[in-house]
Image (tube, rainbow, N blue to C red):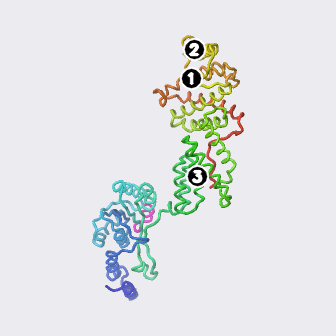
Amino acid sequence: MEDLDALWERYREAVRAGGNPQALYQEMVWPALLALWREKPRVYPFPQAFAVSVHTLGTSPEATALAILGAGAERVYVLHTPESARFLPRLRQDTRKDLYPVEIGKSDVEAIYREVKRLLEKHPEVPVALDLTSGTKAMSAGLAAAGFFFQRFYPKVRVVYVDNEDYDPELRRPRAGTEKLRILPNPHEALAEVDALFAKELYGKGEFGRAAAYFRGMVGRTGNQAYALYALLAEMYRAWRALDFGEALKAGRKLLGQLSQNVWLNHPLNARREALEAQVALLEAVDRFLKARDFALKEGVYGLARTLLHLAQEAKEEAAVLAALYAYRALELLLQERLALLGRRAEAPGLSPEEAEALRKALAELLGVLPEEVRLPAKLGLLDLLAFLRLKGDEALGRLSLAGLRGLAGALKGRNSALLVHGFDVPSPKAVEGIARLAQGLLQDLEARTALGPLSPEPVPLGF
């Protein structure tokens, strides 16, 4: 077969002599180029085995034919318009492939998305090439957008197009033999800045585990270790929200250590150094408390209760049962800390007969029953703690009105009947709000007695 360069020069001369460029191309050049691609198509960066290919078809079918041959898929779908349907027979002839045509409007981008989604759902586990070479600009743009988006859910999808290394301006065509099927990298993966926006969005929504995964992936793709620090930050908050204080503390300490290195002194997170150090100090206090289980470690009680009330606030709209459990536990911890100031423990309060009788009468007053109907448990529960501390002259609880406490009594007593404890009830938003409000008041009192100051589990800004 004659060399393509020589064919191209003969083709050029024939056009200069007045021949029809399109007719001469089909007669002189196209058969040789087609034979070359049937035997060994040029694919960049390297050939890949596609099971399915999807192509847009416009009024220049040659590029689509090369794309079909370059992809080499067993099953070929062609998205065509009513105008380009006439090229389907020729496309079948040139590629020697069975085609599955799908008609769409030339500007119907929604149809592109819809068809791509349908085809990917039909072929979910196989490599798929989406070719955007031909068709209208809207078709190509729609297919590219759909391809790069769906690649996140179908990782074997690749977006491709037929490129060329040399364009002949005189003949207004790519020089034959310089064409190649280019497999495009996903800009979401190739450009860390794009993934950084996804990570930032997830971080802002509180989806810290997914944000950390994005940041770690960006380190691998770019080699930029600055993203590893963001991954540590997100991981700290993920573990903190999961109440895994040991892991949260580990990530926080590691992050502060990294930020102290000379290479990271200008890292954006160092602008939040003071807030991060305070949060890590809070985690350290909680970790010490959980290990010692000593209510004298009031900073740890404060940090844990503060975290639980924060989680209750976050969960109250979409997870009322969880919000209630967080609020119940926060209040219980705060009451137990106040009981410890009296040298007592809830699990073994050591009540004297006089204290037991007084507590029975106080509970009866709160519940609106006779004292003889009240049975004191071996371990003081929420309502028992509240009533006993008032009897002992607790200043903060003593300021609460009897009417207000009676309104809370049902909510406090109902803890054990909650769906995620021992019962089947879902606490009402009003009940949760009342418990949380009482706990917040006690938290503020405890905060004033600690060396930590007002601290929040709120995530610090990323700085970009």
Which quarter shows the C terminus? bottom right
Of 305 and 202, which appears nearest the observer? 305
- The amino acid on which the numbered mark 3 sits, given as a three-letter code, is Leu
SS under mark 3: helix
Is 31 placed left or right of 390 in the picture? left
Distance from disc 3 to disc 1, alpha carbons, whole Å, reads 41 Å
Three-letter amino acid code at the position of disc 1: Lys
Q: Amino acid at mark 2?
A: Gly
- Foreground label between 3 and 2: 3
Query: Mark 2 — residue?
Result: 368
Q: 311 or 333, which is in the foreground?
A: 333
SS under mark 1: loop
Give how far apart the Cα atoms at labels 3 and 2 are.
Answer: 53 Å
**Pointer 3: residues within 10 angstroms few (<14), some, or many (20+)?**
many
Q: Which residues are magenta?
A: 132-142
Residue 161: quadrant of the picture: bottom left
Q: Earlier in the sequence, mark 2 or mark 1?
A: 2
Q: Is residue 244 visible?
A: yes
Can you give x and y, in whole percent of width and height, for residue 332 in the image? 59, 29
Q: Which residue is at a point 55% across and 42% down the rendered structure image?
A: 244
